[in-house]
Structure formats: C-alpha cells, structure tokens
C-alpha cells in the first residue's frame, strides 16, 4: 500500500496529524533542555579566595568592601571589580589574627597585605549561582577540565545512543523506542540531580545523553512519516523551533533558580509524564506498512480519517481487508530480499571508494560536518563567557536559531544549496573574527557590538548546519545514503566533543575562542563552493549519477565514452 495515496484522501496535515505532531514536539523541548543543561549545572560561578582574618569563618560574604585590595583582580570601565579565583595577596602583619575586631568595624585595612600573591585552599562563592563546581570543590584552572569533561561525556553518549536507538526503532517500531528513550533520559537526568559525587554525576551525564540521543531523531522520523510530501520540510522546521525553545528554557530556569539541582530536576522530571504516550500517540503507519503490519496500519488510518472528518474510499478499505492474507508471504519475500540488499550496498560502497570525485567530496563533507558541530555547540557554550547577563546572552544565542532555520528553509529553495551553505559559513566566520577583534581592543561600552556579532555568527552556523543535512543526503547514492549521512553525523560528534573545552582557551586569551570559530568557519565556507548544486536535481541512485551531479551533458557523455574505451 502507498501511504502517500492514503494521505491524499485523509489529508496531508489534518486535525489527526496536527494533534499528534504537537504531542511529539513536546519531548523534543525537554530533550533539547537536557542536551544543554550542563552549560549551567557544570558552569563556573563567581567565586574568590577566602581571606583569613578578614572573612567571617562561619558565614563569609562574597561581596566585601575590602576585597579589591585583599584579592588580585580586574576593574572594568564601569568600576566593577572581578576578583581572581585562586590567588590572594599575602598578609604582611601576621600578628593581626582577631577577625572579630576587624569585622565589628566592617573593615580589613589595606596595610595588612603585600603585593605578593599565593594560592588559596578555601573559597567564598557568590550565592546567586550554585553549580557542581561548588558542590564538589572543582575549583581553579587545574580542575576546570573536569567541568568541560561533562560536555564531552554528553556528546560521547549521543554517539553511543544514536546507533542503538536507530537500530531498535527500525526493528521494534518508532513509538515504543521513542517513549523508552524519553523515559531513560528522564530517569538518568534525575539521577544526575541526586548524584553524591562527581564520578556518579558524570556517569549519569553520559547515560542521560544516551537517552537524549533518541528523542529528537525519533520525533523527527515520526513527524515526517505522518505527513504528506508537501509538509515534510515544514514538520522538520517546526521541530527545530521546539528544540531551540527548549535550549533557551534552560537559561531561564537557571536564571530563576540559581541552583544546579533545581535546573536538572526541572528539565528531567516532567518527561516522566510522556509514558502516557503509549496509549495516546499512534505508531508510524509507514513503519507498520513497511513491516507488513497492514491490519494495524488500517486501524490507525481509519481513526485518522474519522478525526479528520473524511470518508475513506472503497479502494483503500478493500486494501486493508485483502492485506491480512498476504502479510505472511510478503514477510517471507522481504526476508529473502535482505541478503541481496546487503550485497548491493557493499558493492556500491566499494565503487564509491574507488571514485576520486566522491572521495574528495566526502572529505570536504567530513570537514564541514566537524566544523559545523564544533562551532555550533562552541558558540552556545561560549555565550556564557560574554560580558553582560550570561543567562540572557545564552537564551538569545539559542533563540536566534529560530530565524536561522527559517532562513535556511527559504534560502535553500531560492538561491540553492551551495550558495546557502557557503555564504552562511562565511557570514559566521567574518562576524566571529570581527567580534574577537572588538572583544580584544574594545571596552565595556562595545559589549553590545560583540554580542550582536556573536548572534549573527550563531545565525550563520545555524543556517549552514540546517542546509548541510539536506545537501549531504542529496550528494550520496541511494543505497548508501543512510549509512553515509550516519557516518558524517558520527564524525560531527567528534567536533562537538571538543567544543566544551573551547571556553578554557578564553581563560588564557579572551578572544581566542571566537578567532578559532571564525577561521574554521571561513575555511569551510570556501570549501563549500567545491560542491555541485543539487537544487531540483534528481536524487542519485548510483555512483555514476552521484559523480554526474553538477556536470553538463557534454561532460557526462565525454566521461561515459572514456569509461567505455577503458573497459
């Protein structure tokens, strides 16, 4: 049965599809929130050294009037002092030991301190924000790698889970695996919030990412498979909107709560309610038909027709009635076809490897995927280090993705895939480099310019990443398309794994992260113009067709005649 023909009757996006589509979008919101919760749970709050003889030993206060001469630091153009986190000025008069007397007069005299510094072993934290750094004393540069490792473990979990849930969904069905991934994400996320030490936390962070890895892809598949061909791009874009909103919501929750446990519970506990989807959301009709479960598919189609207010034709109804007798024989035929399909896939893969054109193209694709993932996630993570309100900066960097996805959708169909990819990457590269320059030489009065350029850079990388998914699939032969895009996606995760460590570079040279993002994006933008245009071109089924994309008829004929002579 052709499900697209059924959709022509019941409607490509009727009330039935709209209701279920919105239901599958909600877990994506929480999946995105879980994906980036570590930005704030493992973030770096304001903290400074504890100053003996000055700080109250029982209840020290982060903001004290004497901090600027007791602890080294920097004062910005607005007169705001930021103390160093791990150094304190050495006290000259060791005989002053009575902190009670000093505190009673609310003073700690400057003459107590020399200009020499020493490392401290106790800290005072800003009460406005509590993360795992304070929870387990992961302080100073020597330990900050542990915070970055949380993000790396997250992306390692994404790589692991993507393969697992993809295989399970193809075998056991989209719906049940979708629900299991949501519940696994929820339970392991709660485990993070309840962790008693760093090791337990990071193990749960990895497992949480494994669960999260199945939420968006399976929601995407369920959404695309329930609508008609004219609504597929729309379904993917709206899903991305929910993802961006979920990312931004983490910043809002962190801003309001200021506590990492609250943040983690807020994004992890509510998804437990999605267990109810087992009785609410239907299985993918396309998957049921592909697995020859026509009778089950028929029940869902009849229900959809009823909700959409449509009467099914006798032709469609007859298909359901006749299908039961054919299900067993069709399944046997499908099993017999599997070895031939596998052999065909291996043969095409070997042929593709021998193709110089495709291998060069694939190498450029690998670089583009790694760069896109590295810069995309790197900008999100680095947004909290910008001057100004870090929660607002982070939320804006996430929300800018919504117009980014929309512009990608428009640009791909107006100016083509190649120009959309190349120009968006160049835009990201140029704005990041200019932003880095202003950040290095400008003062606090130019913070707005840096943030604006940062947002434009994130807009550019969002457009390019969105285009790259479609563009890559359109350049790979049909038989190995799924494997090819899967391999590229896996390579991208390695770029994403490195992204959490980029903010550490900013601790040494503040504009260095933006410079790195800018250079890599600019190079990727230049290489993108080496790709052939695929807009309104037939999807390649063979290696020859893939090689011929972008070539003129004369070039194709010349290549064919050359190949004939060689043979």
Image: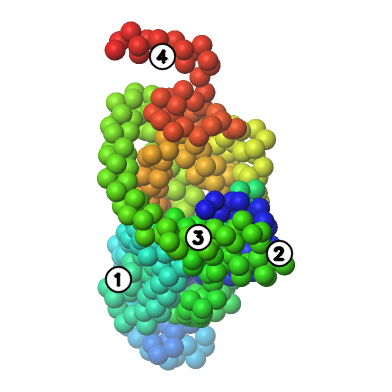
Q: Which residue is mark 3?
A: 322
Whether residue 362 is visible here, answered yes or no, is yes
* Residues at discs 2 and 3 in contact (Cβ within 8 Å): no
Dot placed on the residue nearer the N-terminal end, 2 or 1 = 1
Distance between the alpha carbons at the discs numbered 2 and 3: 22 Å
From the viewer's perspective, is 364 left or right of 339?
A: right
Q: Is residue 16 above or below residue 340?
A: below
Q: Marks 2 and 1: which is nearer the front?
A: 2
Q: Which residue is mark 4?
A: 560
Dot placed on the residue nearer the N-terminal end, 1 or 4 = 1
Mark 2: give few (<14), some (14-19) or many (20+) Cα within 10 Å.
Answer: some
As drawn, the residue found furthest toward the top would be: 565
Q: Is residue 278 above or below residue 443?
A: below
Dot placed on the residue nearer the N-terminal end, 3 or 4 = 3
* Residues at discs 2 and 1 in contact (Cβ within 8 Å): no
* Residues at discs 1 and 4 in contact (Cβ within 8 Å): no
Q: Which residue is mark 2?
A: 310
Q: Secondary structure at mark 3?
A: helix
Distance between the alpha carbons at the discs numbered 2 and 4: 51 Å
Distance between the alpha carbons at the discs numbered 1 and 4: 55 Å
Place residue 535 in its image quadrant. top right
Q: Secondary structure at mark 4?
A: helix
Mark 4: give few (<14), some (14-19) or many (20+) Cα within 10 Å.
Answer: few
Q: Position of residue 82 (x, y in %)?
A: 50, 65
Residue at position x 65%, y 32% in the image: 415
Q: Marks 2 and 4: which is nearer the front?
A: 2
Q: Which residue is mark 1?
A: 203
């Amino acid at each position: 049965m052709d499900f697209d023909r059924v959709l022509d009757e019941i409607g490509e996006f009727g009330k039935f599809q709209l209701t279920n589509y919105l239901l599958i979008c909600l877990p994506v919101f929480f999946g995105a929130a879980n994906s980036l919760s570590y930005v704030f749970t493992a973030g770096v709050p304001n903290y400074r050294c504890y100053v003996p003889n000055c700080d109250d030993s029982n209840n020290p206060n982060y903001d004290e009037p004497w901090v600027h001469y007791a602890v080294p630091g920097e004062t910005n153009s607005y007169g705001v002092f930021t103390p160093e986190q791990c150094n304190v000025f050495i006290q000259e008069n060791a005989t002053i030991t009575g902190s009670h007397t000093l505190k009673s007069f609310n003073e700690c005299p400057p003459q107590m301190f020399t200009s020499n510094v020493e490392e401290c072993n106790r800290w005072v934290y800003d009460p406005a924000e509590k993360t795992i750094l304070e929870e387990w004393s992961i302080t100073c540069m020597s330990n900050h790698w542990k915070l970055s490792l949380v993000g790396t473990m997250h992306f390692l979990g994404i790589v692991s889970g993507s393969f697992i849930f993809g295989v399970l969904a193809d075998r056991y069905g989209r719906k049940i695996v979708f629900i299991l991934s949501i519940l696994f994400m929820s339970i392991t996320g709660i485990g993070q919030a309840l962790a008693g030490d760093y090791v337990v936390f990071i193990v749960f962070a990895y497992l949480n990412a494994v669960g999260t890895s199945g939420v968006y892809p399976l929601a995407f598949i369920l959404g695309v498979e329930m609508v008609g061909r004219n609504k597929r791009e729309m379904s993917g874009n709206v899903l991305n909107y929910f993802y961006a909103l979920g990312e931004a919501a983490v910043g809002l929750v962190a801003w309001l709560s200021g506590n990492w446990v609250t943040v983690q519970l807020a994004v992890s506990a509510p998804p437990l309610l999605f267990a109810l989807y087992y009785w609410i959301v239907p299985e993918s009709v396309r998957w049921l038909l592909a697995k020859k479960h026509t009778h089950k598919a028929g029940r869902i189609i009849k229900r959809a027709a009823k909700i959409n207010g449509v009467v099914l034709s006798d032709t469609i109804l007859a298909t359901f009635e006749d299908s039961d007798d054919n299900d067993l024989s069709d399944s046997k035929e499908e099993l017999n076809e599997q070895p031939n399909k596998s052999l065909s896939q291996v043969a095409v893969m070997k042929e593709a490897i021998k193709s110089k054109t495709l291998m060069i193209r694939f190498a450029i694709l690998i670089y583009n995927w790694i760069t896109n993932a590295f810069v995309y996630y790197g900008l999100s993570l680095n947004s909290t280090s910008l001057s100004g309100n870090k929660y607002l900066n982070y939320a804006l960097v996430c929300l800018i993705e919504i117009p980014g996805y929309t512009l990608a959708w428009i640009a791909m169909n107006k100016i083509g895939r190649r120009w959309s990819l190349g120009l968006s990457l160049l835009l990201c590269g140029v704005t990041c480099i200019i932003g880095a320059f202003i950040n290095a030489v400008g003062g606090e009065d130019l913070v707005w310019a840096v943030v604006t350029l940062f947002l434009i850079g994130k807009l550019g990388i969002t457009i390019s990443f969105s285009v790259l998914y479609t563009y890559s699939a359109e350049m790979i032969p049909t038989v190995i398309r799924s494997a090819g895009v899967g391999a590229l996606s896996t390579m991208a995760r390695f770029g994403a794994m490195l992204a959490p460590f980029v903010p550490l570079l900013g601790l040494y040279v503040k504009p260095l992260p933006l410079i790195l993002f800018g250079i890599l994006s600019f190079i990727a933008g230049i290489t993108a113009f080496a790709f052939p245009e695929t807009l309104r071109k037939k999807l390649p089924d063979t290696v020859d067709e893939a090689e011929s994309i972008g070539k003129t008829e004369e070039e194709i004929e010349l290549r064919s005649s050359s190949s004939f002579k060689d043979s």
